[in-house]
Image (cartoon, grey):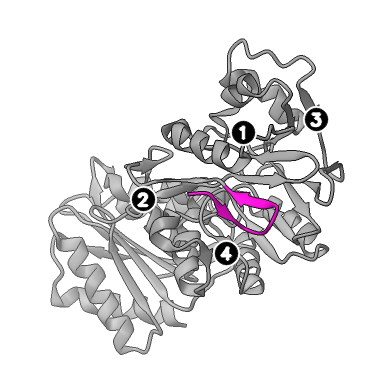
């Protein structure tokens, strides 16, 4: 259904409740939204399209919102296919339409659409350029590497609206989670998982963007995924500031465990019990073999202290832990403290590999002692776990 944001701006995005994996890797149990907007002014502008999966539904909403009028511009903030799949259809359907995008986006466009006639149909814009629609004007903001190199955002001073591309996005269909983000914790939960797994590597570009946003009178943020934000904006912006500085958000210790037959998981849980008994503010234990790894990445960034507990495997490291640490490497994990628990029945090797992988990450301090378990946790192992707990809480 088309939703009016005000007299001249319509929401024409669509929900996808059937998608199993977003970007073929992230579970979305409550779906995802592909947000798109329409500004009806002296000139009419479509702001982004949708994924091909929901292209027909998007066409219906666009046609309804236009009400027989013809659009003048299609503004492409981000050319990733989940937002741009309907570009060719729009250009073919509306002969007077001009495609507005960054020069980089226009350069990349033929990678997605073969033999698309573009001569005289495009307008390259950059930081500081303004597209006047009448009462409304879109001031473009360069946002390269949030999280693709061609990304633009735009600001409409009339509404105080920041069209933020993938920034401030969130998993979850709007029909499931609400059209407006109104509850801090509800928004932050899936926004955090989205940020660290999709945008998280690019903290420096996000910091650059936040400085630009601070100079604007932003009253609403309209992202390409997730709810429109109109209240609690300072809190959401502060969270993005914290996340993009790679600073811990919450006090606590995250214990990530990869256990083959349960012995390592028993040790991880015992450490959790010891930490709680010693006054740890919060302890989260995750079984990497059965949990959502995207949520594990999120929790690793959320807390200041990480414990990795894993079995040795093929003279190396049990694969779920290797995958987890590899993802942390990719996402720029840094500025944390880490403890290590390994298990090995005859030739423990997990600690060596975990230490090597953590050692590639900036400003990650590995705490002593490293705890080695032989197959199953025994009474003789408890002093080492106690010592590790003391180091983690120091």
Question: Quick one: which residue is furthest to the front in this view?
Answer: 68
Q: Nearer the viewer, residue 27 or 341?
A: 27
Q: Residue at x 76, y 21 (%)?
A: 121
Residue range highlighted in magenta: 1-11
- Between the residue at mark 3 and the residue at mark 4, the CA separation in whole angstroms equals 39 Å
- Between the residue at mark 4 and the residue at mark 2, the CA separation in whole angstroms equals 29 Å
Residues at discs 1 and 2 in contact (Cβ within 8 Å): no
Dot 1 or dot 3, earlier in sequence:
1
Task: Kindly tell me whether residue 366 is visible in this rendering.
Answer: no
Dot 1 or dot 2, earlier in sequence:
2
Image quarter of residue 142: top right
Mark drawn on residue 79: 1
Residue corresponding to mark 3: 124
Q: Position of residue 157 (x, y in %)?
A: 81, 58
Residue corresponding to mark 4: 335
Dot 4 or dot 2, earlier in sequence:
2
Residue corresponding to mark 2: 28
Position of 250 with respect to 146 (left or right) is left
Task: Kindly tell me whether residue 193 is visible in this rendering.
Answer: yes
Dot 1 or dot 4, earlier in sequence:
1
Residues at discs 4 and 2 in contact (Cβ within 8 Å): no
SS class of the residue under badge 2?
Answer: loop
Mark drawn on residue 22: none
- Between the residue at mark 3 and the residue at mark 2, the CA separation in whole angstroms equals 34 Å
Mark 4 nearby-residue class (10 Å; few <14, some 14–19, many ≥20):
some
């Amino acid at each position: 259904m088309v939703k009016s944001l005000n007299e001249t701006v319509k929401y024409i995005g669509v929900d996808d409740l059937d998608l199993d994996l977003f970007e073929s890797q992230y579970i979305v149990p409550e779906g995802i939204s592909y947000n798109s907007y329409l500004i009806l002014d002296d000139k009419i502008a479509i702001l982004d399209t949708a994924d091909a999966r929901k292209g027909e539904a998007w066409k219906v909403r666009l046609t309804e919102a236009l009400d027989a009028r013809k659009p003048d511009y299609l503004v492409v903030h981000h050319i990733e296919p989940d937002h741009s799949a309907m570009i060719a259809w729009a250009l073919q359907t509306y002969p007077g339409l001009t495609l507005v995008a960054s020069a980089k986006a226009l350069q990349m466009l033929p990678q997605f659409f073969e033999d698309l006639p573009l001569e005289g149909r495009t307008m390259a814009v950059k930081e500081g350029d303004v597209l006047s629609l009448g009462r409304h004007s879109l001031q473009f903001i360069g946002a390269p590497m949030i999280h693709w190199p061609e990304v633009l955002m735009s600001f409409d001073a009339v509404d105080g609206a920041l069209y933020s591309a993938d920034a401030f996005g969130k998993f979850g269909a709007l029909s499931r989670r609400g059209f407006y983000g109104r509850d801090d914790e509800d928004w932050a939960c899936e926004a955090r998982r989205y940020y660290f797994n999709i945008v998280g590597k690019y903290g420096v570009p996000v910091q650059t963007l936040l400085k630009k946003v601070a100079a604007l009178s932003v009253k609403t943020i309209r992202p390409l995924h997730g709810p429109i934000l109109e209240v609690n904006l300072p809190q959401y912006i502060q969270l993005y500031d914290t996340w993009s500085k790679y600073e811990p958000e919450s006090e606590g210790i995250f214990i990530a465990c990869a256990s083959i037959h349960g012995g390592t998981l028993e040790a991880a849980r015992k450490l959790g019990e010891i930490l709680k008994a010693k006054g740890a503010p919060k302890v989260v234990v995750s079984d990497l073999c059965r949990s959502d790894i995207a949520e594990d990445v999120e929790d690793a960034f959320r807390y200041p202290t990480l414990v990795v507990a894993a079995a040795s495997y093929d003279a190396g490291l049990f694969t779920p832990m290797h995958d987890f640490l590899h993802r942390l490497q990719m996402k720029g994990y840094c500025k944390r403290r880490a403890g290590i628990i390994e298990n090995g029945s005859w030739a423990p090797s997990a600690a060596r590999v975990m230490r090597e992988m953590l050692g590639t990450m900036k400003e990650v301090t590995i705490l002593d002692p490293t705890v080695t378990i032989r197959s199953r946790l025994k009474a003789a192992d408890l002093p080492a776990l106690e010592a590790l707990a003391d180091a983690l809480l120091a």
